[in-house]
């Protein structure tokens, strides 16, 4: 089973971007860890990062046709603004887990609303790079349950 791992705008800067908020772990290291854990759990993880809302929408929209069974997405700032990404997740109709490094609920008011969370099966936020591991375990658990249904 294939899992699509998507990271949105500015996340290519992880490691040096506001390390007090986002930590010092690079995106390459996060992707490597998630891919390795995915293998252990029996999933192939394919990762993409894009600063472009439209590109993310296309990747999500193509996910079922490209054979993905689930999505892990950190939509970054688009979390709070993108009806298009929300609609793409709903249209793909695959189990999706939203992930954030920071606890968006404890930050500025404009980060408190997620337009994408309601179309995801759940959200993991606030645990830095470890949020991704939990998101993967949560999605693997759901996909495993579906596989055995
Ligand atoms: C983020 C939180 C967003 O509010 C922010 O715009 C980001 C990163 C996080 O992972 O904590 O770019 O998604």
Image: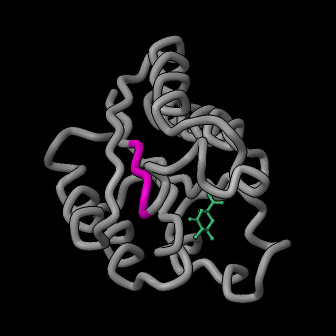
**Compared with residue 61, is residue 142 higher up or lower down, i.e. above or below?**
above
* x and y percentages locating residue 64 in the rendered image: 22, 50
For this orientation, the residue located farthest to the top is 40
* Residue in the foreground of this view, choosing between 72 and 67: 72
Q: Is residue 58 magenta?
A: no
Q: Residue at x 38, y 36 (%)?
A: 3
* Residue in the foreground of this view, choosing between 112 and 93: 112
Q: Is residue 8 magenta?
A: yes
Q: Which residues are magenta?
A: 5-9
The quadrant of the picture showing ligand 1 is: bottom right
Magenta segment's dominant SS is strand
* x and y percentages locating residue 101 in the rendered image: 68, 52
Q: Residue at x 32, y 45 (%)?
A: 48
Q: Residue at x 45, y 15 (%)?
A: 39
Q: Residue at x 55, y 36 (%)?
A: 26
**Compared with residue 72, is residue 120 higher up or lower down, i.e. above or below?**
below
């Amino acid at each position: 089973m294939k899992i699509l791992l998507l990271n949105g705008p500015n996340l290519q800067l992880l490691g040096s971007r506001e390390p007090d908020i986002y930590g010092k772990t690079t995106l390459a290291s996060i992707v490597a860890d998630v891919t390795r854990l995915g293998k252990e759990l029996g999933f192939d993880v394919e990762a993409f990062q894009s600063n472009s809302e439209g590109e993310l929408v296309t990747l999500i929209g193509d996910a079922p046709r490209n054979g993905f069974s689930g999505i892990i997405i950190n939509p970054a700032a688009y979390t709070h603004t993108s009806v298009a990404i929300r609609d793409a997740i709903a249209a793909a109709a695959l189990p999706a887990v939203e992930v954030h490094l920071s606890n968006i609920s404890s930050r500025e008011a404009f980060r408190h609303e997620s337009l994408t969370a309601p179309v995801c099966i759940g959200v993991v936020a606030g645990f830095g790079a470890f949020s991704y591991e939990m998101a993967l375990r949560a999605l693997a658990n759901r996909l495993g349950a579906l596989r055995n249904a």
